[in-house]
Amino acid sequence: METYFLGTHRVRHLKDIIGVPTSPGYDELAAELDQIVDDELRRLLFPFDMPMFPTVPSLAKYKRLRGDAFPKAMTIYALDSGGYNQLALHGEYELSPDDHGGAAYRFAEDLGVPPLWAAPQDFMCEHDVIAKTGLTVWLHQQYTIDSLLYLRENFPHIWWIPVLQGWTIEDYLRHVEMYRAAGIDLTTEDLVGVGSICKRPSVAEIVSIITVLHSLGLKLHAFGVKRNSLPRIAHMIVSADSLAWSRTARDEEIRLRGCAHKGLCNNCLTWALQWRLETLATLVTPTQPGLGLEFLLPSGRDSPTIAH
Ligand SMILES: [Zn+2]
């Protein structure tokens, strides 16, 4: 893995990242890791040039701030579609395709830095999303391709990446073929997103999907990948992102000592950086993970446990 994006809903985070105070212990942990990691991983550890991952719908909420008044990005970033929340809540995207593409152009201008790349309006395939849209997995896959083709044609100054969606491995492989039929050979793309993995309870499923897609020679970005699956897939992906630090702060009622903001640290960059550093630290801890064959049965129940 070359890049680990920090998910955020706050455009100001892209500016505030420079000079954000780090929490007690951060410097020590960073220094300790610095002793044992190679140059490639070292680049991932420190808050300058922190790759950020805002969503288009969250940035689109900044309607009144424009131009010079808009917070200027002090770091690199890529744009997420925010599709899971959009589809799970509304069953469709609130922004039209033109609004989505136009928003990416606007952020390149207003933030003062274009995104490294941007996701199209992809249609993820988690069960709750499929239930909400009322569409089939095949249609979700086709709409994802349609969005990419539209955005590439009409907003060509942004690097739109193809995104694979599905639920089973067979779904993902079919989606690769659907792209090929649409004239897009994913093996020649510089980056291919993998969606519908962030809400899966089974790490084994995530590892299987990434392994198969990696074996096709695809250069992968793993969307919203779980912290506990990262050590098992990091060697097979180019990049990943996570906003889990925010939910973790809410679920575990985290408030760092010394924080001056109100409430919990669910919008706190200091906590976000600490969480990110701790996550990356798991990549350098030499462990032999179990096979973790905790696949789910089609019914959604856990596999029967093997008696020892
Ligand atoms: Zn805080």
Image (cartoon, grey):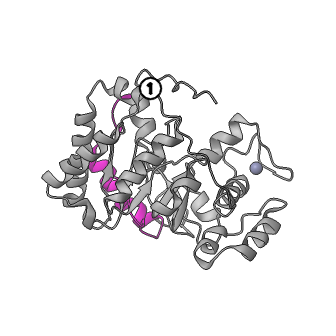
- Is residue 81 at all visible to an observer of this figure? no
Residue positioned 42% across, 51% down in the render: 210
**Viewer-closest of 4 and 146:** 4
Identify which amino acid the numbered label 1 is placed on. Leu
Can you identify the residue that label 1 sits on?
297
Q: Quadrant of the C terminus?
A: top right
Helix, strand or loop under label 1? loop
Residue 263 inside the magenta-drawn segment: no
Q: In the rendering, at what x and y percent does residue 2 appear?
A: 51, 68
Q: Is residue 163 above or below residue 48?
A: above
- Please rate how many residues cluster around mark 1, counting C-alpha atoms within 10 Å: few if below 14, some from 14 to 19, many from 20: few
**Viewer-closest of 258 and 166:** 166
Q: Quadrant of residue 79?
A: bottom left
Residue positioned 67% across, 64% down in the render: 284
Q: Which residues are magenta?
A: 90-119
Residue positioned 32% across, 65% down in the render: 159
Q: Quadrant of residue 253?
A: top right
Q: In the rendering, at what x and y percent does residue 84 appear?
A: 43, 38
Q: From the viewer's perspective, tell me whether residue 145 is left or right of residue 130.
A: left
**Viewer-closest of 115 and 285:** 285
Q: Is residue 74 above or below residue 302?
A: below
**Viewer-closest of 255 and 29:** 29
